[in-house]
Amino acid sequence: MRHEETEFLGGPLDGRVLDVLVGMTGQPPRVYKVPVEQTTYVYHREPGTRGTHRTRWVFVFDPEGKPPPGPKWPWSKRS
């Protein structure tokens, strides 16, 4: 399995760089969930800019835990 270092912004993992599994296309998952006891912290993937961030991809903390915005195809259901 291939890993890529990814920076986390906000929430309990703020400022940390962790190894995250990447898929066949070389991209980490769109949503990264961190279960901690009875709560689950949700992070969304965004492209990292080279001047500001240390890594190619950045996970940004989402306190509400909503699914990321994206195309809404008629044959797919978002819950």
Image (cartoon, rainbow, N blue to C red):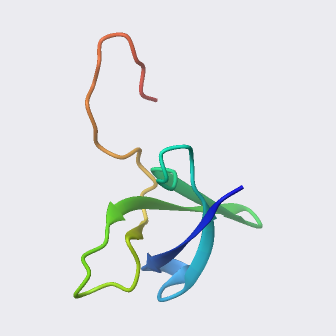
Q: Is residue 15 above or below residue 36?
A: below
Where is residue 7? Give x, y as percent.
Answer: 47, 78
Using the rendered view, name the quadrant where residue 53 is placed: bottom left
Is residue 62 rendered to the left or right of residue 52?
A: right
Which residue is drawn at the image coordinates 59% and 57% (left, top)?
33
Name the image quarter holding residue 71.
top left
Left or right of 18: which side holds 9?
left
Picture coordinates of residue 64 (x, y %)? 42, 58
Rendered location of residue 11, percent (x, y): 49, 78
Q: Quadrant of the N terminus?
A: bottom right
Q: Is residue 3 above or below residue 6?
A: above
Between 17 and 78, the residue placed more toward the observer is 17
Query: Residue at the location (51% across, 56% down)?
Result: 28
The residue lying furthest to the top in this view is 75
Residue at 31% from the left image edge and 72% from the top image edge: 48
* Rendered view: 48 above or below 43: below
Q: How many marks?
A: 0
Image coords of residue 57 (percent x, y): 39, 68
View extreme (right): residue: 37
